[in-house]
């Protein structure tokens, strides 16, 4: 059988359980997923020479890291060509691109410092999401930014947040797509604090000041991302889960952002997604793969990744959940890391769209739990690979590992010469 015949057989098998795989493929084409630029250069950026701070860490020293905006865009382009589906570009403020001899500190960033990224995104019909960068900077004082007791420090970072609101609105206007602007800080302490509420009250006030910058709520979607702990910040995190969730719930237009690497290891974000969808019109996700901690391994097509996608699809929430990838592995080829992670989330979404979700819910509601278990196990071995292959064919990309040949060639010709 050739590919078309194999897909036709798979299509029939799925149709027999009420799943329309053609419709699933069509739907996939229109779902934007945000691709993070920071996989390409180990979260370094272009506006500083110092180390990565904020409690996050990249491990590995694989050759070929992008060193300039041109190299990063070239590498990203290489990866984008290998991935099916609709992409959005996710930038951090530290990826500002300055003209020769020009520099602006984080509190003075302007839209013009991101004009080259806008050009890049528009040429590829991508929207842009944005993140103020509250780390890797000398004005992070004693590990604190927006929650600092030092008013000068706090003011600097509030001004950075406001500048990022203005830049986010510029992105949305230029690309015609809303910009999700995510606020995350690594603020916290290594050891037991004496005051947990003071820093949180300052953090609350700082985010409120940032959001007082005028913006169009249809264009800019501010989010607050929580975290459980960071490296060197083990005892206390200011922006904890309860803090971020309560802030979003009590501030109109502000979304909670869940990063599935930012919880205790036995907690699962798949269960948190429907809980938040009961209350929030829109939520945001950072999709990553934590191993024992927020290790930011490349996203795989694993059980929890599948389960997160299922919760979005079966609750009809594809237009209510802003999905972004957030991981960085410096120990393997970075173009391959981008491609595997993006394709894994694409697989998870397509897989969720190829499940008889209505039927399964009905079995649960009728308390036919034996049938539910049998059916959920049965669909696991359906010919999903054929649907994935057909989707990739329609998107004009390779469905199997043969894309790795292109990456190896690129590594030999471009990356290894850096
Ligand atoms: Mn994140």
Image (cartoon, rainbow, N blue to C red):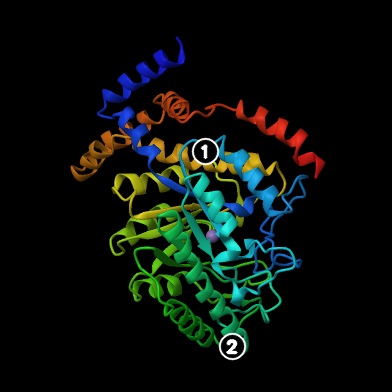
Mark number, residue 343: 1
Q: In the displayed structure, does residue 355 sit left or right of residue 418?
A: left
The residue shown at (57%, 34%) is 82
Using the numbered discs, state the Cα–Cα distance from disc 1 to disc 2 in whole angstroms: 45 Å
Q: Secondary structure at mark 1?
A: helix
Determine the image quadrant of residue 24.
top left
Q: Ligand 1 appears in which quadrant?
A: bottom right
Disc with the residue nearer the chain's start (1 vs 2): 2
Residue 39: image x %, image y %?
63, 51
Residue 175 x, y percent position in the rendering: 45, 54
> Does 248 appear above or below 267?
below
Rendering coords of residue 214 (x, y %): 40, 76
Q: Which residue is mark 2?
A: 194
Q: Is residue 175 above or below residue 62?
A: below
Label 2 Cα neighbours within 10 Å, binned few <14 / some 14-19 / many ≥20? few
Taking 354 as reference, is 224 left or right? right
In the rendered image, the quadrant that contains the N terminus is: top left
């Amino acid at each position: 059988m050739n590919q078309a015949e194999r897909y036709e057989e798979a299509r029939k098998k799925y149709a027999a359980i009420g799943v329309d795989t053609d419709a699933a493929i069509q739907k996939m084409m229109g779902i934007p997923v945000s691709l993070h630029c920071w996989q390409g250069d180990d979260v370094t950026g272009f506006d500083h020479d110092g180390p990565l701070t904020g409690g996050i860490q990249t491990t590995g020293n694989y050759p070929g890291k992008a060193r300039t905006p041109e190299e990063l865009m070239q590498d990203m382009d290489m990866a984008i060509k290998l991935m099916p589906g609709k992409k959005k570009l996710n930038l951090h403020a530290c990826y500002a691109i300055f003209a020769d001899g020009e520099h602006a500190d984080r509190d003075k960033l302007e839209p013009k410092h991101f004009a080259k990224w806008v050009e890049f995104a528009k040429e590829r019909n991508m929207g842009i999401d944005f993140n103020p960068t509250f780390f890797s900077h000398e004005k992070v004082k004693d590990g604190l930014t927006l929650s600092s007791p030092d008013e000068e420090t706090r003011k600097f970072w509030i001004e950075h947040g406001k500048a990022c609101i203005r830049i986010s609105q510029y992105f949305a206007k230029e690309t015609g797509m809303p910009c999700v602007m995510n606020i995350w800080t690594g603020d916290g302490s290594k050891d037991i604090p004496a005051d947990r509420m003071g820093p949180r009250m300052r953090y609350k006030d700082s985010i409120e000041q940032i959001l007082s910058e005028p913006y169009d709520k249809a264009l800019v979607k501010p989010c607050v991302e929580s975290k459980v702990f960071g490296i060197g910040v083990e005892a206390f995190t200011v922006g904890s889960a309860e803090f971020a969730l309560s802030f979003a719930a009590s501030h109109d237009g502000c979304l909670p952002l869940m990063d599935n690497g930012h919880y205790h290891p036995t907690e699962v974000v798949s269960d948190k997604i429907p809980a938040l969808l009961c209350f929030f019109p829109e939520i945001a996700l950072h999709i990553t793969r934590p191993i024992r901690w927020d290790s930011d391994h490349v996203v795989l097509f694993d059980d929890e990744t599948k389960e997160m996608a299922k919760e979005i699809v079966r609750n009809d929430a594809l237009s209510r959940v802003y999905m972004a990838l957030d991981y960085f592995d410096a120990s393997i080829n970075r173009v391959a890391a981008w491609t595997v992670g993006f394709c894994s989330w694409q697989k998870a979404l397509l897989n969720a769209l190829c499940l008889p979700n209505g039927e399964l819910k009905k079995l649960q509601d009728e308390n036919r739990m034996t049938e539910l278990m049998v059916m959920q196990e049965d669909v696991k071995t359906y010919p999903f690979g054929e649907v994935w292959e057909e989707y990739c064919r329609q998107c004009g990309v390779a469905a199997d590992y043969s894309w790795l040949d292109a990456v190896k060639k690129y590594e030999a010709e471009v990356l290894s010469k850096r």
